Image (tube, coloured by chain):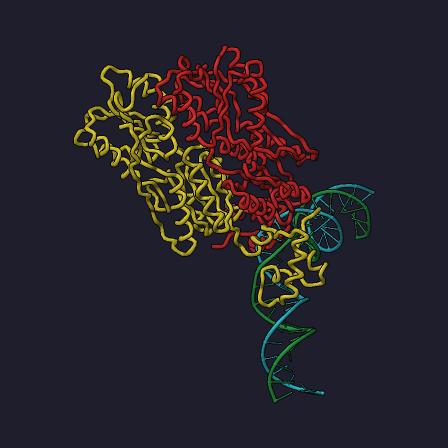
Chain colours: A red, B yellow, C green, D cyan
Amino acid sequence: MTSTTLKKISEVLGLSISTVSRALKNHPDISEKTKQIVIELATTLDYEPNANAIHLRTKNSKVFGVIVPSISNFFYDSFIASVEEESRKMGYSLIILQSSDNTEIELNNLKLCRQNRVNGIFVCITPSTQNIQPFLRLSEFNIPVIFFDKVPEFEACNKVCLADTQAAIIAANTILSKNKKKVLGIFGNKNMSITKKRLHAFEDALKLKKNILHVEHAHSNEEAHAISKQQLSLKYKPDTVFCMSDEILAGTMKAIQELHLNIPKDVAIISMSNGFFPKLYYPEITYVETSGYKLGQLAFSRMMSYLAGSTFMQELTLDCILIEGQSI
Amino acid sequence: MTSTTLKKISEVLGLSISTVSRALKNHPDISEKTKQIVIELATTLDYEPNANAIHLRTKNSKVFGVIVPSISNFFYDSFIASVEEESRKMGYSLIILQSSDNTEIELNNLKLCRQNRVNGIFVCITPSTQNIQPFLRLSEFNIPVIFFDKVPEFEACNKVCLADTQAAIIAANTILSKNKKKVLGIFGNKNMSITKKRLHAFEDALKLKKNILHVEHAHSNEEAHAISKQQLSLKYKPDTVFCMSDEILAGTMKAIQELHLNIPKDVAIISMSNGFFPKLYYPEITYVETSGYKLGQLAFSRMMSYLAGSTFMQELTLDCILIEGQSI
DNA sequence: AACATAATCGCAAACGTTTGCAAAAAAAAT
DNA sequence: ATTTTTTTTGCAAACGTTTGCGATTATGTT
């Protein structure tokens, strides 16, 4: 059975299409009597308006695009979840696309967003994305692009980020306040601006005691596991490990279980995290909260204010707080 | 700047809209010469076809809907990721909607899918969903609905599931083969068909030694943590814990860390899992794989075969395999 | 009864495509 | 030069809505 349209309803009722349309949206021009019969027939015929036709006619798709490297990720999934929640409340739908760390697919996803005439795009670029011109050009078509989390480093564009610098400082200060003597700092991919920011701020905050810090880089939890295992097996081993992300924390914790180390007696742990992982361990891990959920809310509100007219470039940051566990 | 249309291109070139349309899709009727100039102008004007107009005209949205209780979940996110991947390859986009365990929102999401005239829907119903008539009625509008994971228990409909029964039997047999004497089985929400299936098969496989099994139900990892902690503190404590899901495994593992138990010496662990969590612990946890990723692939291929004409109801199950860690 | 006003409704164009069919132009055959 | 065939292009309708404006009908005022 083909789905019912305004036309079909109008024919059955002997009314014009426009009257039916207006009746269904409670337009004052239509009498109560006709409204009634129209609504009645519409419900029995299970009428649902064709979104494509509406979008075409009104030139407003009520859809946002979300482009992420991967959906299946502790951070992005909570970002997406909160954006979806907010969007639904405001009558928007979401088209979600993952780039799989492939810039070609990423560009194709961008194209898809344009073809669908989305009202705006939330994008987290892949680590290898260099040329962000294609993104910026979308503003010529009146499609706002909001970068989040991993954002372009230099260009002027709309960004919402975690307060990476602040977060790293909080972590460093916590370590200092506990009077730690030998810190292993495990950071992510060197090429990402987010890594640079966090590392730089962390080193800076420890600068008076720079010699207590040893830095490593890991690109996966397996790598973090290997590094942690090796470093924590040393005779003169670190008394504290700082993990830049949940991924790294997971690797480190596996090494700690493997080496049967006691937290925080043998080694203290502090991490930056979305908040889920630290509560899975005992004792619970102390972390600086880098919430994907909250970042999603911030990004969404930025999008709405952009659409409301505030179109100048803006870089927003989300304040970070320390959530204390018993790991340091 | 408003985006370019076929009309605009046709006006500039002094051609008709239809010629431009055909030129851009390499229609044999159009001469090479005109094709050339049309394509050239289209690229310099950055033409992208309006998906809404195409969908309206062709009555084919090339979009699938995905409705899940929550995006931010170890299992659903990998399911979604694989469906997205397959869809993209076949030229489909995804509208993803989360129901937040709220049947009202769930129904609204269903309505959204209809309004968008999606080509099909993948849905995992919430635990509290009782009435699935609204889902089944979509087939009257030629919208196939494929239920996955948590599927309606009795109704005839298209389902793709893990081989829950088989998986539970594998776990039980593994336990038996290790000659375990006292098993704590922690299962999920009693109302879910998936729980019933797994529990029933598990009990059945242990029926000769039914007295060795103690069953509990947990609705969150916190609850699983509390149960495990309590049970594993008993003097005559279980020598094995079976966890029905990743969520439960996470709670159990926290309790084990808290009680400083050694795996598998003090207690053995076996779980059903998507595959990510068991590798985060040391020793790695033995589990029966219940892969969201693979289930997504199965669901997608079922959708495609349905669209290709195989519209009779069908219940597919995904075989499960044991992945051995060192936890039992 | 005649008119002004207010309440209802319908016409038709537009959004940007696709596509069957007819028309025009070019090429080929007589 | 005329006709036939082939190649190339354009017309117009349709997909399902929304909306400005004009038309019709009902109501109210003298």
The quarter holding residue A129 reads top right
Q: Is residue A34 visible?
A: no
The quarter holding residue A259 reads top left
Q: In the picture shown, does residue C7 fall above or below D14?
A: above
Residue B292 location (% of width, % of height):
39, 39
In front: A45, or A210?
Answer: A210
Image-based side of B278 in relation to A127, left or right: left
Residue at 16%, 31% in the rendered image:
B208
Residue at 53%, 35% in the rendered image:
A84
Image-based side of C1 in relation to B247, left or right: right
Quadrant where the C terminus of chain B sits is top left
Residue at 60%, 41% in the rendered image:
A62
Picture mark count = 0
Residue A328 location (% of width, % of height):
46, 14
Q: In the picture shown, does residue D23 fall above or below A306?
A: below
Residue B13 location (% of width, % of height):
71, 61
Q: Is residue B106 visible?
A: yes
Q: In the picture shown, does residue B248 fall above or below B63?
A: above
Residue B272 location (% of width, % of height):
32, 33
Q: In the picture shown, does residue A84 fall above or below A114?
A: above
